[in-house]
Amino acid sequence: MVKRFEIWNIDLNPTIGHEINKTRPCVIVSPDEANKNLKTVIIVPLTSTIRHFPTRINCQFKDKKGQLAIDQIRVVDKMRLIKKLGDFETQTCIQLCQKLETIFKY
C-alpha cells in the first residue's frame, strides 16, 4: 500500500501548458485511508529548480537540494507510480502540512 509522506518516482506525462512534467520524485500527501481505498493519490512534485514562491518548500532528498512544488499539487492514478524512493524526515512533513493548511485556509 502507498502511504502518506512516501516519496515515489511518478510519471507525470502527458501534461498541458505549464503543468510540471516528466518522471520525477513526488511525495504522497493523501491520507492513508484514501490511499488504501482509492485508485488515485494526491501528490506534490519535487523539483530541483529553486523558485522564491510562497507555495514552495525547500527540502533535501538523497543529498539533492530542491523544493516541494505545492503549487503543482495534483491527483494521479496509482498506475503512474513507478518506484518507491524513500520517505521524508518528520520536520519536512510538518512543514508541508503547515503550508498546505495555510494555502487552503478559508
Image: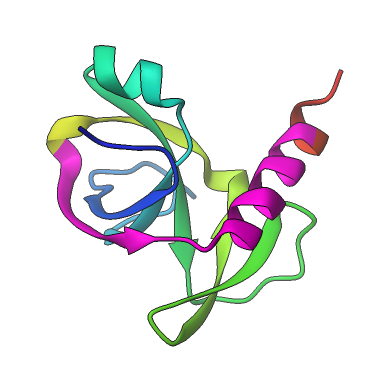
Q: Residue furthest top?
A: 37
Name the residue located 43 percent from the left edge and 87 percent from the top edge: 63
Q: Quick check: 53 left or right of 90?
A: right
Can residue 87 be found in the magenta stretch? yes
For the residue pair 67 and 72, the one nearer the viewer reads as 67
Image location of residue 52, percent across then percent down: 76, 70
Against 75, is 6 above or below? Answer: below
Can residue 36 be found in the magenta stretch? no
Q: Quick check: 16 left or right of 97?
A: left
Against 87, is 15 above or below? Answer: above
> Across the whole image, how many numbered discs are drawn on residues?
0
Q: Quick check: 38 left or right of 83?
A: right
Name the residue located 76 percent from the left edge and 33 percent from the top edge: 101
Residue 74: image quadrant is top left
For the residue pair 19 and 93, the one nearer the viewer reads as 93
Magenta residue span:
80-101
Q: Quadrant of the C terminus?
A: top right
For the residue pair 11 and 64, the one nearer the viewer reads as 64
Name the residue located 26 percent from the left edge and 12 percent from the top edge: 37
Image location of residue 49, percent across then percent down: 54, 76
Against 83, is 50 above or below? Answer: below
Image location of residue 87, percent across then percent down: 39, 59
Name the residue located 24 percent from the left edge and 47 percent from the top edge: 13
Against 93, is 85 above or below? Answer: below
Image location of residue 75, percent across then percent down: 39, 29
Q: Quadrant of the N terminus?
A: top left
Q: Residue furthest bottom?
A: 63
Q: How is the image coloured?
A: rainbow
Residue 3: image quadrant is top left
Q: Residue furthest front?
A: 90
